[in-house]
């Protein structure tokens, strides 16, 4: 598919200015790797050519007038100022063109809306500022965070090839299967887009939107959140890995096992060191985007945790904020987002990192009890 | 009203403007108020433009260099709000104030005191809006479309001030619109039937009705936000049983007609300028009027084309797709009429005509991308990318803004009594033309290649065109200082303008001397 896109780009670029036809000067949409994206691409090209043809005619006549009908001593302007036939014609002809155009557009749209008979269902949830993928038929799910470092963003090191378009855990889908996506959001509206699939659908809190795709070629496909969702809107990429069915099955089995192991961890007896170690990672993925890696926050929207009352004093209050969130603010309820282990680890970490030396810890079991009291 | 005008005509002392600051604070004169609107609008244009420069500077290269994402979002939001509500709309109200009474042979606007009030509300509203930049938590950062719940539950504390500012702007716009309607319907010179009205008057009449219809909806939606933020309701909060999509329906029910509010008066002005410099009557006057009417009516039933990806049911999706495609038909008719007017005319290309011709060409390009966006399945790829940014800048910069520049050059001799400096004005045109295309054309490519809008940083494959675009933007921005120079120069002096400085121009405004005296048409002219 990239080959297609590049070929189209090179072709167009070559027509316009040979010197510009390097790969990065992409001019056109990519036809993509799904039936839908190819349908869209051909609609796009059709309407583009219709516009080009109309443009050439209209601007042609206009430029003819600009050059041939300039004022000169022997030039007297004509004085026609209406012509019913012409006026009717140029109302009817565009109308007919549009009706013709509407037919394939309608067909494509109907096809895009047909989300029935899917082989795989994946729930996609937008969070500020990461995606969560839940494989609802197989009982596991995980977050997908941007993996581009701050050093790259702030120009302290060289930018990698997939700058801003790389994540820790991509979504994985099997090639050739009909995958249905159920999209929603936890906080504000996000929008999930992979250009090469021809899918863009808003993820809206309180709603579940549906979309589907069938990827024909294995590969890694990249996109971004396309609905302004706050400070890090530009930093929540979408990455999808399409793999052959058997590879997909292995991957699912592995994920299920890992999820099972995770659940068992709740029962384990954790030491402070273990919790701190795990907490640092969980904090970096779930909390640091607002409260910052060093706990300094960015007041007033995102309070500091370093030296804060909540992290130093009453444990139950701390649990309450993390598990239930603070309504009316950007502080989400993490109770459903994180496992008991991660909740315990994060809270323990927050109470002992950056000089918050309370020495207190909370275990996964205690978190479990807290969540299930009354 | 006409009784008042008559007694006025019998006054034998012809009083001029008051002296000093009170002239401007207390004036009820349509020309003074028109000038104030225009000056205010240009000031906002420079302020909003300065913000655009910050945006383009940050986007010059990948990586974060100049501003943090938080401030970047404040800049995109404020840029949009200031340009829409502060620059484009007041400029057209300014033109309406100056020109409608002159074009219909009326002594002033119908409601002169309200006119003063609706102007002076504007600086207050924008003072509030701009002051949010200095508040704790910063200015609004949720885009000019301020989608909930990003703007409600997750908005900065200054959102309430933003809401108040929008309310005041809305009041000002509605009063302005009432004034325009009252003036046009009641104060036309004897003999000027509706179908003899100049097109600028027609388009403003229709625009004013659009304003009255949709500004209250905007006021409603921001009031609902206000309640959600401060009084515990949950209109738009899903966790309280509310509906974030309802916000978008309400916003775009206002928003789509709003985009036509920003272009119809320009359609009107261009329909005067092209005939004047083609020395040939406007082709298809009646169809022009009907086309504007059709556009205005259709503009109420296309709003959800901004929401193709929110997941409306397929029947709705199809309806809004068809309706949107349909709106291209009357838009096309207008373009064809302008071209037919030029055809076999006797053309010259002074600055107003240059801007008008560029208007027709570039606005049409924006119309083409609009038509592409109307195709719902394709919009799934275009939506919220730079392709949309390219589309609306093509209809708004060479559309609305060039329309305003064309009007300003066309009527400056009438306003000031002097000719502007033609060489400088042509320079202004060519630099703007090149800068604008350099800035906005590559955005089509960026969008098609997959660059989302409203991001402070981007992937490496977008680097080249972004740099080109930023260079174009700086060029366009810097050029606008030249316009200030030209206008100041023209106000202060220059070749004397005759009553009708353009030999092909038609209309009552050219029957009064240049500069137009402080009071005109105290006795109504006769229109045959
Ligand atoms: C042929 C006529 C037009 C058609 C068919 C059309 C169609 C569209 C469509 C479908 C969109 C939504 C794109 C998206 O978000 O995915 C859009 C966006 C927009 N259009 Fe147009 N348009 C037309 C003319 C105009 C005019 C005359 C103006 C203003 C003078 C205008 C201003 C805008 C603006 C401001 C937006 C973007 C708003 C935003 O999301 O920030 N359009 N147009
Ligand atoms: Cu619209």
Image: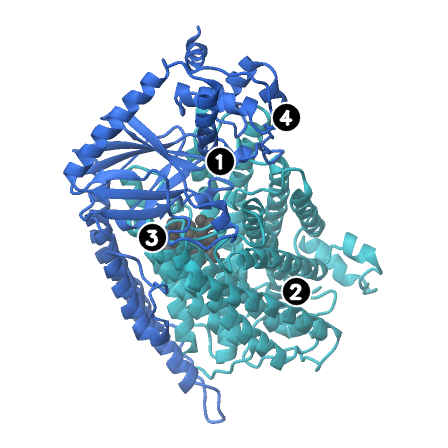
* Mark 4 C-beta to ligand 1 under 8 Å: no
Q: Which residue is mark 2?
A: B524
Front in this rendered view, residue B387 or B299: B387
* Sequence-first disc among 2 and 1: 1
Q: Position of residue A345 (x, y in %)?
A: 46, 22
Q: Dot 2 falls on which chain?
A: B
Q: Which residue is mark 1?
A: B148
B431 lies above or below B156? below
Question: Could you confirm whether marks 4 and 3 are on the same chain?
Answer: no
Q: Which residue is mark 3?
A: B374
Q: Position of residue A284 (x, y in %)?
A: 47, 33
Q: Dot 3 falls on which chain?
A: B
- The quarter of the picture where residue B47 lies is bottom right
Q: Dot 1 falls on which chain?
A: B
Q: Judging from the image, what is the letter of the chain drawn in blue? A: A
Q: Dot 4 falls on which chain?
A: A
Mark 2–mark 1 Cα distance, whole angstroms, equals 51 Å
Crowd around label 3: few <14 · some 14–19 · many ≥20 (10 Å): many
Q: Nearer the viewer, mark 2 or mark 4?
A: 4
């Amino acid at each position: 598919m990239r080959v297609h896109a590049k070929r189209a780009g090179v072709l167009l670029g070559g027509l316009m200015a040979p010197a510009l036809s390097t790969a990065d000067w992409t001019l056109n949409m990519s036809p993509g790797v799904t039936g839908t994206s190819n349908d869209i691409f051909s609609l796009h090209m059709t309407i583009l050519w219709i516009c080009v043809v109309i443009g050439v005619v209209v601007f042609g006549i206009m430029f003819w007038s600009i050059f041939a009908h300039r004022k000169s001593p022997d030039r007297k302007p004509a004085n026609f100022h209406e012509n019913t036939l012409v006026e009717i014609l140029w109302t009817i002809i565009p109308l007919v063109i549009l009706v013709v155009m509407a037919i394939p557009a309608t067909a494509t749209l109907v096809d895009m809306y047909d989300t029935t008979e899917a082989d795989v269902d994946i729930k996609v949830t937008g969070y500020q500022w990461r995606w969560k993928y839940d494989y609802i038929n197989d009982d596991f799910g995980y977050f997908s965070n941007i993996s581009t470092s701050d050093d790259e963003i702030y120009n302290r090191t060289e930018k990698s090839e997939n700058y801003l378009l790389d994540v820790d855990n991509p979504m994985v889908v099997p090639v050739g299967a009909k995958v249905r996506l159920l999209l929603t959001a936890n906080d504000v509206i996000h929008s999930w887009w992979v250009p090469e699939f021809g899918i863009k659908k808003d993820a809206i809190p309180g709603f579940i939107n549906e979309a589907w795709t069938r990827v024909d070629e294995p590969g890694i496909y990249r996109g971004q959140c396309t609905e302004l969702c706050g400070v890090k809107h530009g930093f929540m990429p979408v990455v999808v890995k399409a793999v052959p069915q058997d590879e997909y099955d292995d991957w699912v089995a592995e994920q299920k096992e890992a999820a099972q192991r995770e659940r068992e961890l709740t029962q384990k007896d954790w030491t402070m060191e273990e919790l701190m170690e795990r907490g640092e990672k969980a904090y970096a993925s779930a909390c640091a985007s607002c409260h910052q890696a060093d706990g300094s926050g960015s007041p007033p929207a995102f309070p500091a945790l370093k030296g804060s009352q909540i992290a130093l004093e009453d444990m139950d209050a701390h649990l309450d904020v993390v598990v239930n969130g603070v309504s009316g603010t950007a502080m989400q309820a993490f109770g459903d987002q994180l496992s008991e282990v991660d909740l315990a680890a994060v809270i323990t970490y927050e109470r002992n990192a950056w000089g918050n030396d309370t020495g207190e810890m909370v275990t996964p079991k205690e978190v479990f009890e807290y969540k299930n009291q009354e | 009203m006409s009784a008042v005008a008559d007694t006025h005509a019998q006054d034998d002392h012809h009083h001029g403007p008051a002296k000093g600051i009170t002239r401007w604070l207390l004036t009820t004169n349509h020309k003074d108020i028109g000038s104030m609107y225009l000056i205010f609008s240009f000031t906002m244009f420079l302020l909003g433009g300065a913000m655009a420069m910050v945006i383009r500077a940050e986007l010059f290269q990948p990586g974060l260099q100049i501003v943090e994402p938080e401030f970047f979002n404040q800049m995109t939001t404020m840029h949009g709000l200031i340009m829409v509500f502060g620059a484009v709309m007041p400029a057209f109200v300014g033109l309406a104030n100056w020109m409608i009474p002159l074009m219909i042979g009326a002594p002033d606007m119908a409601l002169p005191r309200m006119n003063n009030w609706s102007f002076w509300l504007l600086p207050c509203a924008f003072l509030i809006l701009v002051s949010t930049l200095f508040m704790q938590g910063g200015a609004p950062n949720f885009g000019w479309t301020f989608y909930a719940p990003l703007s409600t539950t997750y908005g900065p504390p200054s959102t309430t001030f933003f809401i108040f500012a929008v309310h005041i702007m809305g009041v000002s716009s509605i009063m302005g619109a009432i004034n325009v309607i009252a003036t046009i319907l009641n104060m036309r010179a004897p003999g000027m039937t509706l179908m003899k009205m100049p097109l600028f008057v027609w388009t403003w009449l229709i625009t004013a009705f659009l304003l009255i219809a949709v500004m209250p909806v905007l006021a409603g939606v921001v009031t609902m936000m206000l309640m959600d933020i401060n009084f515990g309701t949950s209109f738009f909060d899903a966790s309280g049983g509310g509906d974030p999509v309802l916000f978008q329906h309400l916003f775009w029910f206002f928003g789509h007609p709003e985009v036509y509010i920003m272009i119809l008066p320009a359609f009107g002005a261009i329909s005067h300028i092209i005939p004047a410099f083609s020395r040939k009557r406007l082709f298809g006057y009646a169809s022009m009027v009907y086309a504007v009417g059709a556009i205005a009516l259709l503009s109420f039933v296309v709003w959800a084309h901004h929401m193709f990806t929110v997941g409306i049911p397929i029947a709705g999706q199809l309806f809004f797709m068809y309706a949107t495609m349909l709106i291209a038909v009357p838009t096309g008719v207008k373009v064809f009429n302008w071209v037919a007017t030029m055809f076999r005319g006797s053309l010259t290309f002074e600055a107003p005509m240059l801007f008008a011709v560029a208007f027709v060409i570039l606005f049409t390009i924006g119309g083409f991308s609009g038509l592409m966006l109307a195709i719902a399945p394709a919009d799934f790829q275009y939506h919220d990318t730079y392709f949309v940014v390219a589309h609306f800048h093509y209809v708004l910069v060479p559309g609305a803004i060039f329309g305003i520049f064309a009007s300003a050059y066309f009527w400056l001799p009438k306003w000031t009594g002097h000719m502007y400096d033609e060489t400088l004005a042509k320079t202004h045109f060519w630099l703007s033309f090149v800068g604008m295309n350099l800035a906005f054309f590559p955005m089509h490519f960026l969008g098609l290649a997959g660059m989302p809008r409203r991001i402070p940083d981007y992937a490496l494959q977008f680097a080249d065109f972004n740099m080109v675009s930023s260079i174009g933007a700086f060029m366009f921005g810097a050029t606008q200082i030249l316009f200030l120079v030209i206008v100041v120069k023209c106000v202060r002096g220059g070749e004397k303008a005759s009553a009708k400085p353009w030999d092909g121009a038609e209309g009552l405004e050219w029957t009064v001397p240049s500069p137009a005296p402080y009071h005109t048409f105290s006795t109504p002219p006769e229109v045959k």
